[in-house]
Image (cartoon, rainbow, N blue to C red):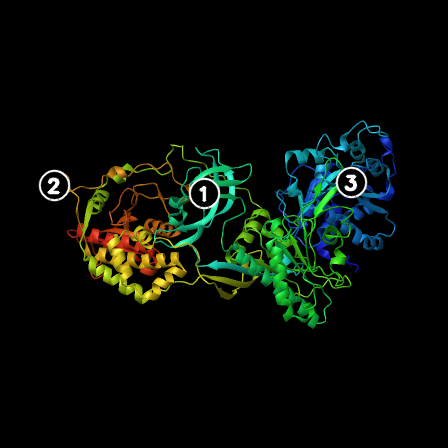
Amino acid sequence: MKFKFDGNQEFQLIPIRSVVRLFEGQPKKQDLPLLMGEYGVFGNNLNITTERVFENLQQIQEENNIPFELRNDSLDFSIEMETGTGKTYTYLRTVFELNVKYGWTKFIIIVPSISIKEGVLKSYQITKDHFEELYSSVVSSCYEYDSRKPNQVKSFGRDTHINIMVMTLHSFNKETNVIKQNDLDGFEDTPISYIQKARPVVILDEPQNMESDLSKKSIAELNPLFTLRYSGTHKNYYNLLYRLSPYESYQRGLVKKIEVVSMKEKFNFNKPHIRVIEIGKDNNKNKPFYANIECFVKDRSGEVSVDIITIRQGDRLERKTKNSIYEGYRLMNIMTSTKQIEFENHQVFSQGEDNDASKKEIQKLQIEKTIRLHFDKQQEFIDRGLDIKVLSLFFIDRVDNYVNDGWIKEEFEKLFDEIKLEYEHFKMKDKSKVHNGYFSKKVNKKSGEITYKDELGNNKTDREIEKDVYNLIMRDKEKLLSFEEETCFIFSHSALKEGWDNPNVFQISTLNETVSDIKKRQEIGRGLRLSVNSDGSRVFDKKINVLSVVSNESYEEFVSRLQTEYENEFFKGEKKITPDNGNNKRPLVKLKKDVLDSKEFKELWERISTRTRYKIEFDSDELIDNCIDTINDTVEINEIVYQIDTFEITMSESSGVGANTPDSGIINTSGYTGDLPNLIEELKKETNLTTISIKKILEGLDDYLLEDFIRNPQDFIYQVSKVINNEKREFLLSGIEYEELKDENGAILYYDQSLFADLTKVPENKIVDIVSDKSVYDSIVVDSDNERDFTKHFVDNPNIKLFVKLPSKFHIPTPIGNYNPDWGYIKEEKNPMTGKLERTLYFVGETKTSQDELDLRAREWFKIKCAEHHFEHTLRAAPDAEYKVLTKTSQV
């Protein structure tokens, strides 16, 4: 196979022309004499001023719709092209254009990793004939910098033709590097001095990996004429020249469309789940070291969900999650050097890994699904007469799980042999020959000898594996795409990131952790390039070019993470810094004492400020009977299942990343197999009922429900305790009575107006300014958009004479905790019959988006019902006052 290239693709020609036009005014190649400099070096020269370069830059940015603020004063220029759109081709061709136009011959490509270096060298090799056709009179050479051949640098400086030297950053970023030694035979100075006098054009491939101060200093020591930065995921922009966004690439069909197959276990919250997301340090805290972990968190209703929380040394996970399955998980150590955390029960977790018992089962499902997708895709191409070889790429969590007969390798081969019998093309394939893995290599510092781990875990020298996995995957792209080569499934840990891709990767299976070091964009980027057929021609059929990502997370999580990465990486706006007002005593919300002392406010406050207490009477036997009946009639325990969703990613500049409605499937499991929790004790914790009451309820349940407890104990506890708590609330409401709270002399107690004071510690983005005397504050602190709407309505409505957002310490006691209503307000109304103002109404209002019990959390609904009982008692002698829940401003 020989790759074929189209030299007329406008999305590649525009960034090439943009770089060349930066230097308009520079004398043409034929107008410049060939001058030898010191040490016999023929160097590049810039004969125009930097002012002229930046004038050209402004014009190019205007034409390419680039914001002017993405500029700085250095001769560094960024070009952003989505992964898979030919970034390497673009900058290699730019080298030839700069030579033809301006005569520059010295170019250095700096890469952050071996995989990218190999990719660059391979790209030059496969494009060389193409460039020779386009630039027939131009002689060029491209080679890897080798510290064992220092004379190579001397030749780089003295040669008069195009020299492209590819260097890894670590080969010249230390004083001990050979390139900086000044006592080498045959050198007038250090080898790097030949580069410095050559004034090379420096090209940075994936510059976001070279942003440290040491990296910047080392690159500057090369004395570049100017620097070009090429990436699909820039960390910082330096005079951005051109941008081909992922959205535009996707819409124009320049990359594959993405189909995601997500696999998640559902309804299994029976064992502790801990995934370490991040380990970090916050210098503003007494305990600066923290860990963000994903775990099972219970809300106040007892429902369990996957959430991310922050824990510090000494924290008890059972308390933080309100979940008893984490008993014994007290955080003892945060080890920042190894990125690990350790609990009191000696459980240790590393960043990016978890203890999810279902993880291995999901990985097996992913392997099976990937094999089937691979077979289906290849069979589709065969049936359509398309000569396209299909490749699949697995990202694994641990190298040991694949090498040395690891379980992933064994599982893959077992499933391959089972599934291949259903597909004619694969029936005779040898399971051991269709897969291989590339992992990191090791370099012996003394001998320079390179060793790799092959698929069997044996160490081989670089000579011994010349035709083995490294060359196959990293260098022999044409061979890998040939049907004569049986390898079509590739396994990697983290080595295949930026710098490596293959146009015929149609499946990517992420057996690694969702929160691994490899980002979603890096993972899917390995397969975004449009496919090629066996003669090397690009295939543009959109129906063919679909990349299937077999993921171990829900499709909502996948889309959310991908969208977040795009937002973080593209056109990042300046962060708005919100001042920390925690220690700032300047009032952000000021109290208006004249309004507080007004007659209207005192009348309102007198109506609503009565303090109360409650008492409850109900029949416990009747409660138990009701619980038994409701549980037997309504409770259905969820089976533990694996849900598989398949959906297509959608992208647009306006709405970002989305997904169509997924096709879903369910695979049942055999249920929970671990130790059963103490059912009575767990229900006591969740319901606060006595042991005797819990036993009576359990004794009255149907036998099949108790069998369901064995299959999914935590869901049983949640469902049953939810029913009991709901029944309890109904009984409590029917038997609750409020009475005024009195002092020792029998006088009724009221909330004091001192609850109102200047506010200094509130988020400024929650403040709504009030330009009227309708409130006791000059601003209102709101907790939601709904409250913001009510605030504006209170201000604008001429019938509202006064309103107050009730302070947090103004509360009503309830059996499940204190309740804080939202508003108090005064409204004047005219009699619709007479048109005369007849009375002033006093209200206490609770603003919710819904009054429906089903739309409110049970605890919240219960507290509102208790508040109704409270105000029914305290306002019984005030016919001009009323408590109600408001859902929209028109109800005020």
Asked which quadrant contains residue 754, the reply is: top left
Mark 1: which secondary structure? Answer: strand
The disc placed on residue 287 is none
**Residue 68, relative to residue 530: is it above or below?**
above
Report the Cα–Cα distance between label 1 and label 3.
46 Å
Q: Dot 3, crowdedness within 10 Å: few (<14), some or many (≥20)?
A: some
**Viewer-proximal residue among 698 and 641:** 698
**Residue 531, relative to residue 275: is it above or below?**
below
Q: Dot 2, crowdedness within 10 Å: few (<14), some or many (≥20)?
A: few
Badge 3 amino acid: Tyr
- The quarter of the image holding the N terminus is bottom right
Badge 1 amino acid: Thr
Badge 2 amino acid: Gly
Report the Cα–Cα distance between label 3 and label 2.
93 Å
For the view shown, which residue lies furthest in the left direction? 745
**Residue 594, relative to residue 476: is it above or below?**
above
Task: State left or right for residue 336 relative to residue 695.
Answer: right
Label located before the other in sequence (1 or 3): 3
- The quarter of the image holding the C terminus is bottom left
**Across the whole image, how many numbered discs are drawn on residues?**
3
**Viewer-proximal residue among 249 and 143:** 143
Residue on which disc 3 sits? 145
Q: Is residue 883 visible?
A: no
Asked which quadrant contains residue 46, the reply is: top right
Residue on which disc 1 sits? 310
**Viewer-proximal residue among 348 and 144:** 348
Report the Cα–Cα distance between label 2 and label 1.
48 Å
Residue on which disc 2 sits? 746
Percent position (x, y) of residue 109?
Answer: 74, 43
Percent position (x, y) of residue 334?
Answer: 49, 38
Mark 2: which secondary structure? Answer: loop
